[in-house]
Image (cartoon, rainbow, N blue to C red):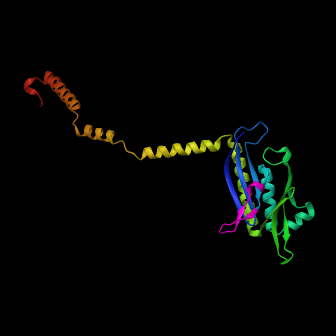
Amino acid sequence: MSLNNVMSRSFTGINLIMVSIVEETEPREYQDKYFMFIKAVPSVKSDTSTGRSYDHKSAITFKMNAEKAFSMSFALAQYALGKGTHYEKQFGNYAMFADGSKSQYGSNSKKSMSVNYYTNQKTGKSTISIFTAADQTKIPFFMSPYEADAFSKVLDFMAKQCLTLEIAGPGVVIKRQVSNQQSQQNNQQSFQPPQQSSQQSSQQSSQPPQQNNQQLDQSANKVANDFAGFFGDDKLPF
C-alpha cells in the first residue's frame, strides 16, 4: 500500500495544523482513491531564532473524506460569522472522533477533534479553537474570526479538489506530471527550426524548373505543326 501526496497546506500558530490530499495507489473497491489527512502537531521549545519548533512524533492525525472536510469547513465558517453559539445550543459543537486501533494510519488511541469558542479568562476575549486530544496529549489551535474564515475556504477548496480527482480516476496526478513533461519537451523541439530542410528548399527554389520548360517547348512545337498541316507552309501564322 502506497500513498502519493497531492497537495498540503499548513496553518501555524502556537501549534500547527496540517491538511493534505493524498492518492491511494492501490485502493480497494469500497475505498476512496483520494482522501485527506488533517494533523495537529504540538510545538516544543527550541534553540532556534524563533524559539519554537514542532514535534511531529507527537502529532494526532485524522483521515478525512471530502464530506467530513465540507462539514468542518461549514462549522468554521459559522464560528467565523459569530453564529457558533447558536449551532452549539441547537446541535452541539462540531466534533469528530476516531479509534486509532482500527486505523492503519494512526496510533492505538482514541482521539477527537472539535471546533468551538475559547474565552480567555484574563482578557475576556473569545477566539475560535480547534481542540485535538488523544489520551494524555492535548493540542489546541487558536484563530481569529478572519483566520477561521480563511481556514474554512481552504478546507472547502481542498474537499472539492478531492472529489474532482476521484472522478478523474486513479493515477491522474502521475499522468498529469508525465503530460507536463512531454509538453515541455514538445515546446522545446518546436522552437528548433529544421535548418537543413529549409536550406534544401531554398536551393531547390533557386534552380529553374528545366523539365517544365522542356514540356512547354514540346507543346508549342506540336501546336505549330498542327497549324502547319492545316494552313500550308506559306500560310503559317507564326
Left or right: residue 25 compared with residue 60: left
Magenta region = 43-59
Task: Give the residue at the far left of this rendering.
Answer: 234
Q: Is residue 94 above or below residue 171?
A: below
Viewer-nearest residue: 187 or 22: 22
Q: Is residue 225 left or right of residue 146?
A: left
Q: Nearer the viewer, residue 237 or 210?
A: 210
Q: Quadrant of residue 16?
A: bottom right
Quadrant (top left/top right/bottom left/bottom right) for the N terminus:
top right
Q: Residue at x 23, y 31 (%)?
A: 212
Q: How many marks?
A: 0
Q: Residue 193, image x and y in percent?
A: 37, 44
Quadrant where the C terminus is found in the figure: top left
| Residue 46 counted in the magenta span | yes
Residue 179 vs 230, above or below: the answer is below
- Spot occupied by residue 119 in the image (x, y as percentages of width and height): 85, 72
Q: Residue at x 19, y 26 (%)?
A: 218
Tell me if residue 126 comes above or below residue 229 in the rendering: below
Is residue 162 within the magenta segment? no
Q: Is residue 204 above or below residue 86?
A: above
Within the image, what quadrant is residue 101 found in?
Answer: top right
Q: Position of residue 207 (x, y in %)?
A: 22, 37
Residue at the extreme top: 229
Image location (x, y in percent) of residue 68: 80, 52
Residue lying at the far front in this picture: please name it.
Answer: 47
Residue 3: quadrant of the picture: top right
Residue displayed at 33% across by 39% down: 197
